[in-house]
């Protein structure tokens, strides 16, 4: 059930790039500003949800009892538990780390969406499971299975096919580079949020992370100079980012990963880049060439194989 919830969240997240692009082209809202408003608008709703949940839990337990930690049976597989490099960190440190990594992920992802195709940007930002597996390889010194190397080769080859047409177009190439950089921060965010999720329930965790991410993004939005939409339609895309993507997507995912390790969480989100390509084609008219479609398939297959080799 948790994996199905994760798939639903991934499908909703696929809309993120489309909303960012529409906010830019229809209301002149900068990519950093749309990232800030996504967090700032969602934060009050999440804080209210966390407050209501706290009140309900407070009334449900005896006054003399101490809060019971949320159970986390870790029923994701029969494999050994993944390494927990941040396990010794305090809870506030994990939340701050996750918020900062998520904010930086949005900075580079929104730049990528603005400069290159939405499908490219979303696929590139979802290299996270490959990076997570590589990081765990370094941390544990346990080499992954050969299938991981095959997955890595497929993902890199697919990325080359997708990026190839953009050589000679510096803006689009910078967008592809930004998408790949965002994957680094997205991978770090997933590790941080998975560790924090073992200590906090979904509502307070996502409320704190969203609020802190808004604080991190605020100076980026101010410096950009396109802080406010120039047309009312811009607020429609902002509300879509805040309510559908941030609350409906990210919160659902944070809820689901309580039983899933970071690598499996990333694989469940393969639906996000796949749906992003479909949404961009239908809503923005962004059709990929045959070579880019082949590349997209190789990237998705590579990410899947990377998880299998974990």
Image (cartoon, rainbow, N blue to C red):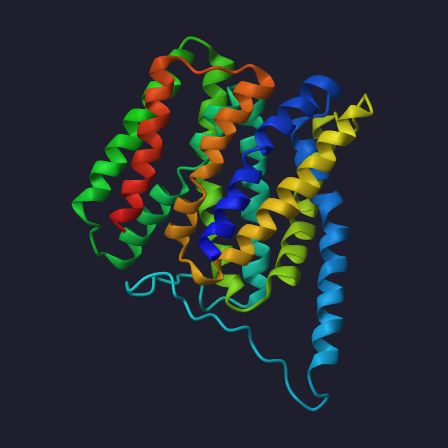
Measured as percent of width and height from the top left, residue 160 is found at: 33, 22
Outermost residue on the bottom side: it is: 64
Q: Between residue 127 and residue 275, name the one nearer to us.
A: 275
Any part of residue 220 in sight: no
Measured as percent of width and height from the top left, residue 196 is found at: 53, 62
Any part of residue 231 in sight: yes
Q: Is residue 81 above or below residue 123?
A: below
Find residue 245 and report its image quarter.
Answer: top right
Find residue 79 and report its image quarter.
Answer: bottom left
Q: Residue at x 78, y 24 (%)?
A: 233
Q: Residue at x 31, y 32 (%)?
A: 155
Q: Is residue 33 left or right of residue 1?
A: right
Q: Is residue 221 left or right of residue 137?
A: right
Q: Is residue 65 above or below residue 59?
A: below
Q: Is residue 22 above or below residue 247?
A: above
Q: Between residue 219 and residue 5, name the one nearer to us.
A: 5
Measured as percent of width and height from the top left, residue 146 is found at: 17, 44
Measured as percent of width and height from the top left, residue 158 is found at: 32, 25
Outermost residue on the top side: it is: 168
Q: Residue at x 76, y 65 (%)?
A: 52
Find residue 255 and report its image quarter.
Answer: bottom right
Counting every numbered tag in the picture gives 0
Q: Residue at x 59, y 65 (%)?
A: 201
Q: Is residue 187 above or below residue 162?
A: below
């Amino acid at each position: 059930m948790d994996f199905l919830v994760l798939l639903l969240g991934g499908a909703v997240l696929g809309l993120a790039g489309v909303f960012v692009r529409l906010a830019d082209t229809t209301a002149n809202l900068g990519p950093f500003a749309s990232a800030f408003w996504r967090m700032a608008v969602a934060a009050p709703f999440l804080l209210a949800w966390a407050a209501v949940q706290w009140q309900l839990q407070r009334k449900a337990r005896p006054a003399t009892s101490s809060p019971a930690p949320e159970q986390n049976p870790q029923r994701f597989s029969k494999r050994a538990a993944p390494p927990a490099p941040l396990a010794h960190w305090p809870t506030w440190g994990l939340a701050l780390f996750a918020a900062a990594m998520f904010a930086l992920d949005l900075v580079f992802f929104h730049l990528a969406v603005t400069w290159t195709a939405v499908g490219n940007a979303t696929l590139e930002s979802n290299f996270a499971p490959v990076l997570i597996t590589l990081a765990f390889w370094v941390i544990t010194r346990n080499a992954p299975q050969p299938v991981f190397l095959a997955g890595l080769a497929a993902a890199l080859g697919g990325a080359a096919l997708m990026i190839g047409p953009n050589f000679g177009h510096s803006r689009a190439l910078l967008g592809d580079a930004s998408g790949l950089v965002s994957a680094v921060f997205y991978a770090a965010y997933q590790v941080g949020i998975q560790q924090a999720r073992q200590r906090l329930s979904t509502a307070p965790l996502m409320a704190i992370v969203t609020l802190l991410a808004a604080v991190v993004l605020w100076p980026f939005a101010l410096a950009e100079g396109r802080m406010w939409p120039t047309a009312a339609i811009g607020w429609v895309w902002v509300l879509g980012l805040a309510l559908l993507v941030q609350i409906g997507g990210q919160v659902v995912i944070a809820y689901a990963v309580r039983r899933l390790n970071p690598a499996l969480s990333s694989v469940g989100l393969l639906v996000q880049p796949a749906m992003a390509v479909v949404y961009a084609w239908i809503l923005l008219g962004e059709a990929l060439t045959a070579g880019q479609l082949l590349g997209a398939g190789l990237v998705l297959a590579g990410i899947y194989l990377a998880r299998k080799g974990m």
